[in-house]
Amino acid sequence: MVKTMSFTKKKSVQGSLEIIGTLVQVCCNKGGHICSKLKKLFDQGDYLGIIDYQFDYHNLPLDSNDILYARQIQGLFSKQDFLNLGIDKEEVAFLKFLQSEEQCRETNRRFRIGAPAYAGVEEVLYLSRRKIASILGDVPDISELTFKFGPGTNTSTSMEEANPRIKLSSSLECSMNFAPFARAFLSEFPNWEAAHQVQSCLEDRKMFNDITFSLEEYWPVISVSKGQLCFVPKTCKTKRVIVKETILNGFYQKGVGSYIRQCLAEHGLDLRDQQKNRDLARKGSESDRIATIDLSAASDTIAYGFVLDQLPPEWFHFLEIGRTEAVTYKKKDLTIELQKFSSMGNAYTFELESLLFYSLACSVCEHLHIDSKDVRSYGDDIIIPVTAVPLMTEVISYCGFTINLEKSYWSGPFRESCGADYLYGFDIRPFYLKEQISERVLYLMHNWFVRHCENELADAVLSFVRHDEALWGPDGYGDGHLVGNHKLRTSRTLIRNGYGGGVFDTYTTKKRHNKRRYFGDWVYPCYSIYARFGNSDEYELGFCDGLVTWDKADSITGTVIPSTSVDPDATRGLTGYKKISIYTLATSIFGRVNQSD
């Protein structure tokens, strides 16, 4: 029997480097002088040199494979988390955060004093304000919004407790901004409010020797708290700064963000669909008429003054209610009053920045009398006609943002957007190695190379796989098995019952559960019904209302479990992997015999 532990056991750093070295050699054999240069850096142990190598897409080598495989070599290092590069990634991220705060402070000053700007910029800002007002319309009543918990943590719960049942039982905290609104907001959810009333009453009865108290005397205790500065993995050189929000702020932010997302969709910007951005990036790499612009630390430089300038007053107040105005950083015992309006961690930041950049880009085109049909924004991932780039650059700079020149392209044959990289219309995105190699990672790598027709690289990876424990199966069912030639198992019973297919084995994740009982459990059914029938846009995250839909959340297996399947005890994280059998009609690697399969 296959031991699932061996599937996730990480190889040593030296063992991982041995595998990487083999892949580097294959890339070097298929590439040219750039690959040879990167191979030399690898042999010297200069991994930072590989990561920092800048590709010149304006002066491409005659051999296009050189760029393709050189990027793959770089992709094996640029996002990994196991090599010691002598960099304190959290310190780098924190210093960048402070730098962004200073940038926001300067932007706030600029908008406060009304610093003069180029006339074109002034008109674009005016047009953008009108565009935003048109998209958002009137401020909705609270009853028109659907509020729900996101999949992440907050100041009242840990990551292991990121579950709606537990969150409904967690202490009620909010920011200073939200405090005057908290009781009125909580009254919109009477069962949640009542649960905390009963709990407070029971605790007091226990403390005061079962003296009878009237429930009407109790209001849920709502404490004022600050956000918490946290760091999560990003690249091999830095971490990503996020703010852990208070529970009531996060709940409110989620509802507001969903409403803004709906407004954007009604005006042609569907944030659930990244494919349009990718198609435009490909088109731009072919025609050189569409630019892809990426901003540096965009979420950390959305200045308070800029948002105040752009949003209608009533909408600004509506968003400011849920804003976290201060954060703490425990490692350095600091409290920081934020100059930014919102940051990563705020549940409406993504929708807000998409709205702001989309409106600015459309307004630039309107000012220049350029067709805006190719304008898109997915967060700070902006697509705009090349002829609009000079003015857009001026506008972006005045509003306090910085264009990331390493990831923005408006000339030459290369474009990138929403995880797609195109050169002359061809996809050249590499496989990014993000963690120390294990059997599971080898499966991921092998299958990625197979799907991208990189057979030599796939074979190189396969040489390191434990063949006596290897599982094989068809594509379309995730990466818990190796995609390749396979033989389905069948049985006399299946054949007699008319089943023409068979089964194959694959690994799937084992969910983490918290089966403890909480006083908010009796509220959970009401919450589930309320959240399920609201405006849902969380399905793509793999978590909806705390109910895990493993067809999206599970990166290892594509096994589809209907979204009606619920597991109220499931929390964030995994406890391991298990081997399961899947029935299918797919007898070849990619093909399917029957569409109903």
Image (tube, rainbow, N blue to C red):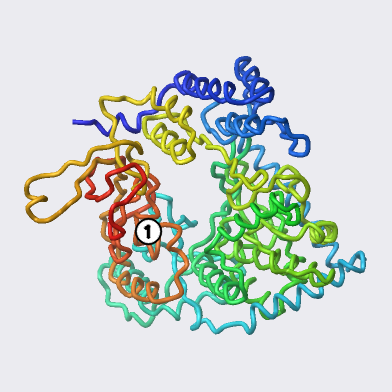
Q: Residue at x 28, y 56 (%)?
A: 594
* In the image: residue 422, left or right of residue 83: right
Looking at the rendered image, the quarter that the C terminus falls into is bottom left
The residue furthest top is: 44
Q: Position of residue 508 (x, y in %)?
A: 30, 44
Q: Nearer the viewer, residue 174 or 148?
A: 148
The residue type indicated by label 1 comes to Asn
Q: Secondary structure at mark 1?
A: loop
Q: Is residue 294 visible?
A: no
Screen quadrant of the N terminus: top left
The image quadrant of residue 176 is bottom right
Which is nearer the eye, 328 or 584?
584
In the picture of the structure, the residue carrying the numbered disc 1 is: 163
Q: Position of residue 258 (x, y in %)?
A: 53, 70
Is 202 on the left or on the right of 233, as rendered?
left
x and y, in percent, of residue 226 in the image: 58, 59
Residue located 32% across and 45% down the image? 509
